[in-house]
Each structure stands twice: as structure tokens, then as C-alpha cells.
Image (cartoon, rainbow, N blue to C red):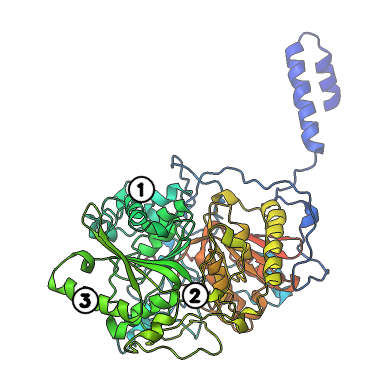
Amino acid sequence: MAISSALSFLSDRKRPIVVSVFLFLLLSSLFLLFSPAPAALPFFSFPSSHLSSSSSSPIAATPPPLTPVSVPANASSPETPVDASGGSNAGATAPTRDAPQPDRSRSTPPAAVGVRGSAGTNGTSRGVSAGGDGAGAAAAAAAGVAVPSWEVCEVGKGVVAADYIPCLDNVKAVKALKSLRHMEHRERHCPTAPRPRCLVPLPTGYRSPLPWPRSRDMIWYNNVPHPKLVEYKKDQNWVRKSGNYFVFPGGGTQFKAGVTKYIRFIQQIMPNIEWGTHTRTVLDVGCGVASFGGYLLDRNVITMSVAPKDEHEAQIQFALERGIPALLAVIGTQKLPFPDNSFDVIHCARCRVHWYADGGKPLLELNRVLRPGGYYIWSATPVYRRGKRDEDDWNAMVTLTKSICWRTVVKSKDVNRIGVVIYQKPTSNSCYFERKQNEPPLCPSREGSHSPWYAPLDSCLLLPAVSSSGEGNSWPISWPERLNIKYSTISDNASTQFSQEKFDSDTKHWKDLVSEVYFNEFAVNWSTVRNVMDMNAGFGGFAASLIHKPLWVMNVVPFDHPEALPIIFNRGLIGVYHDWCESFNTYPRTYDLVHMSYLLQGLTNRCDIIEVAAEIDRILRPGKWFVLQDTEQVIRKMDPVLRSLHYRTAIVKQQFLVATKGFWRPYSAGSESR
């Protein structure tokens, strides 16, 4: 009856306009009724042939030979940066493109970030509920992994929860120290039972960092909301607050005219320094906000900027947020986590270290990590002031440097009458044997491991190892040619395990793998990656494959692995020793991409996969990426753990797990905001 009435209506020629409208609506309804529903678009846009969430194909312990693949280049759609509460950064200057929208059903409102803890706890947590998706829980059960209900870290009194570093913020252990005389409270004191399995909250209003090179000069205030240095160093032009930003004018205590002029001044008084060719690796001790290292990047110099976590609030955090290489470290009672004879240059501008204290142990540590023929640049008041205290410090320094055979190359003042002295470490061991007094004494010849991991400072003078070929004291060839040369400062016995053939094979392997797979098949927006953490660096081949990208890589060699870190430094790259069952000496949210290749299986023989995942989450920035290369079995264990953290994951070519961290943090309705 209804159809008959409609046809009668349509036959009426007096209503042509109404008829047209009726026909349009009728046809549209039929089209919508019988059209299939569109499929939801996946977060990762990979060809289906390259994705696998389950497979029975075995994966070799080493990556298979690479074959060319045809895949579309990855591209991330532009998005406005998103803060931790899900708000848009509309109007922000130079927005980044990679930040995903937070999971608003789970993300923590700024007022609800709960840190429920009491003084003296060591990064444990309690009483805050969280959870992953149901599919993640099922996958975890299938893989035999017990995924926890993630909780927010509890911290001790005086520790900012959003800045928590477990091994440096162990309040209970620091309170138990019998002495603070040698900066013991700034050294590593890692929680052991239980190890941290908690998540660090985001600062209120956190945003994706500005891109490089803009981030070198300004960062979001809310990402590191610590204004103490603005007031404390206001006359030295370190940092200023400007609206929603911290601005870094490039000043410093010893370079008031600006860091660029200071760098140029050093080149003028010491032409052999040859920034970026002869000098490639620099250690900046007591670096402040690391402007020295930041501006040396323009000259192809990679600087490891180090300073303790001390009363100069957040100086290393500022450096890393700016995108500059930096590490929390102190010369206290233990060696720095670098190999012998590593750095081309060591720099200290007004760093507050008594180099001659304790029989000269601090300077002996610098001597250990300085390459033979390398330079020590000291810019400090004893160099150019004539008060009694400064003169006493200068005289003590003269005596100590002569006793370790350092030669004074130049002593000069800039236009602002700021003095600089440059010493050079000898290239020959003859001077050490010709000293009239054996003070400090020569160290006995070393046997076994040379790793400085948790090793006490030397009170003796270390002689550089010289191989039978004589290459131990020779200088690496100029940058960038040295990147692809195997050059070793370690003994013949240790060097035999690192043959030139192995080195060349590793270099080619990573070059091919990164160009064919990492750049083409991973949903990683490489244009927004400013720094990378390689958790198992080997020879540094992965870092070498990225050398043409505007980023830097922190190469980590696990402390119990073969000692390839000297080769990494000789290539003109930087890195450290570390134990990944402990937290790394960096602030939370300081790396854009964390990379792990064939490390997890052996690592979880000593610690739990949940603890490793918590540390990866701590150091990875929201909106950024974790890449795991491993066997299918290991990938299937890690995948549900990351999904329980609300990471978006994909398995590529059955040997890569690519995960993107979101802005999710656990909280409960009853949690308190601190």
C-alpha cells in the first residue's frame, strides 16, 4: 500500500521538484542500507605481507640475509602536538608531527596524577589501578608473561615524581651513607629488592618537544618546570624564561660573550684542535645546560656533557630536553662509565672540582679517559685570578699536571679577560719512566676486564696500552673517515676477538638493514627523532648507519659483554657501559627512539621483563618509538607487556617489534595529586 501511494505520488506531474527530492532520498537510503561498513584503519600502515602477530616460522639468532623489498615509504600525517591531559597545542610554534592522540579513556588528568608515597621508599608503588586491553592480557597469558597492574612510582621526600631516577633517587640508601665527603650521595645506589616496576607520571601540561635545531635554543617550560637556574644564573645568561618557554641564549659562566665566540677563541689559540676533523669526541665536565656541546654539533663534534644531579636544578634535564647529548655523572669514588683513552678533548669551564684532591684522583680519572695526544681545556678562575685561594689552586694544579706528564700547550685570555689553559697528554710512555719521583705511582699492568663499571677510582697513573703494531698511541684518522676504520686502543689479546672482517661485516649489515627496513618499513617519523638509545651497541654499526641523519646516538655496551666500546669511541661515536637490570643515569622522557637488538633473552636471565619494560618506558618520550629486534619467542613475550602500557605495536618481518608510546599513565579516581 505504501509503495502504491508513493508511485501514485510520483506520477503526479504537477510536483516535479518534490519528485526529484524524493527520488534522491530514496536512492541514498538504499545505497547506505546495502553498502559494507568501512574497516577501521590500523595505526601502523604496513603491507599485510610484512606484518605478523603470530607465526610458526623459526627466526635465526642472527638476522637473515637482506633482500630488496618493495614497500611504500612511511609517512606520518601532520598532527598538532598534544599535551599530557589531551589538550591541543593549537597556536604553538613549529609543531611536531608525530605525537599521537592520548587514550582519553585512560590518560591522567593533570590534577589526578597521583604519587602516593612516603619518605624513604625506593620507587615502589601501591594502591593505584591500571591495566591493558583484553587482547594484550590474552597474549601475555599465551606467552607465559604475568603482566602487572601498572602503578605510579612512589618516591622519597624531596624527589620530584616526574623526574624520578631510581638509582640516583634512592632516598633510603643515601640516608644510610656514612660519608658524603666524596660526593657519595650523587653516585649510583640502585634499589635491589624489589627493583622498580612502576611508571613515572608526566609533568602537568607536557608537550612533544620542539624540533631540532630550534630545541637547542628553546624548550617548553612545562616539560621541565624548574625555574631555579633562571634566578641562580641570571647574570651569566645560561637560561631565561619567556612565556611558555625556557630560552637558552648560549651564555655561560666562562663565556659571557656567548658560546660561539668561546669555541672560536679556543680554535684561535690552539689551531691543532681542528674542531670536527682532528677533534671529534669531547667530554664536557660540569657542563651546566650543555650549550658548549650543543653548539659544537654544528662543527661535527659530538660531546658527552656530564654533571651530577645536584643543587643546580635540572641542568642535565635541560640539556637532554634541548636535544644535546648529556649524562648524569660525578667523579666521586668510582670511575666514569667510559673506557680508557676515549676522548679527543676534555673540557671544564668553571666546573667545581678540586682536581688535586685525594692525591689527584679526580685528575687521574680524566687522564684515564683522555686519549694519548688529547687536550684538556681548563677555563677556571685559578687560571687568571690572583687571590690567595686561586693561586694555591693554580700551584697545586701545576705540580699535579707535571707529575702526570701533561704539557702546557697554551695559556691565554679572551677579550673579557677570561683565562684558558690547554694541556696535552703525552703520546709516548717515555716521560712516565723518566720522572724523578714515582708519584703518583704507575699502575700495575692490568689483567682481565678493563670495564670501569662500579670500579673504584685509581690512585695510580695508568699507562696507555700499546699493541705490538704500535697503534695504541696513534691518533685516529680525520673525521669522517675514521667512522669506518677499525682502530683499537686495547691490547693485542683483547683485539683479536674483534677482527677487521667482523667489523666490516657488522658495518655493512647495519647499513643495509637500516636503509632497507628501518627507513622503509617502520612507522617511525625519522624527521622528528633527535636522539637514539642503542641498548646493545656492539661495534656501533647501528649508530654509524644513522650518521647522515640530524640526530645522535648513545651507544650502550652492557657491562658483561665483550669490550667493544673503545672501538665505538675510536670511530668518533660516544657511549657508556651499563647494566640494563638497573636504571640508566638519565631523566625520564629523554630519548626519542630506544633500540634493542638481541639483548632481552640474556637480560631476563638476571632480571624480570617487567623491570626492563618499566625502564624503557621511563626514558622514552611520549609519542616516540621503541624498536626490538629479536627472536619470535622473545618478541611474543615483550609485545603484551608493551600493550599493557597502552603502546601501539606491530611485528615486522617476524623479527622486529615496533612500538609507539602514548600519553597514558595509570591513575585511580581516589589517587591524590602531589
Secondary structure of the residue carrying numbered label 3: helix
> Residue 181, can we see it?
no
Q: Which residue bears the numbered disc 2?
A: 583
Horizontally, residue 40 falls left or right of residue 368, namely: right
Instruction: Decide which of tag 1 and tag 2 comes sooner along the chain.
Output: 1
Mark 1 vs mark 3: give the one in front.
3
Between 57 and 550, the residue placed more toward the observer is 550
Is residue 289 among the parts visible in the rendering?
Answer: yes
425 or 191, which lies in front?
425
Name the residue rendered at 43%, 83% in the picture.
Answer: 462
Label placed on residue 479: none
Q: Is residue 624 above or below residue 141?
A: above
Q: Are marks 1 and 2 in contact (CB under 8 Å)?
A: no
Q: CA distance from mark 1 to mark 3?
A: 47 Å
Q: Position of residue 567 (x, y in %)?
A: 57, 71
User: Where is the N terminus found, in terms of image quarters?
Assistant: top right
What kind of residue is marked 3?
Answer: Asn
Please provide percent x and percent y for residue 27.
80, 27
Q: What residue would you read off at disc 3? A: 395
* Three-letter amino acid code of the residue under disc 1: Asn
Pointer 3 with pointer 2, Cβ within 8 A: no
Which image quarter is the C terminus in? bottom left
Kindly state the secondary structure of the residue where label 1 is placed: loop
Q: Are marks 1 and 3 in contact (CB under 8 Å)?
A: no
Numbered circles on residues, count: 3
Mark 2: amino acid: Ser
Question: Closer to the camera: disc 3 or disc 2?
Answer: 3
Q: Secondary structure at mark 2?
A: loop
Q: Nearer the viewer, residue 461 or 202?
A: 461
Q: CA distance from mark 3 to mark 2?
A: 40 Å
* Mark 1, residue position: 244
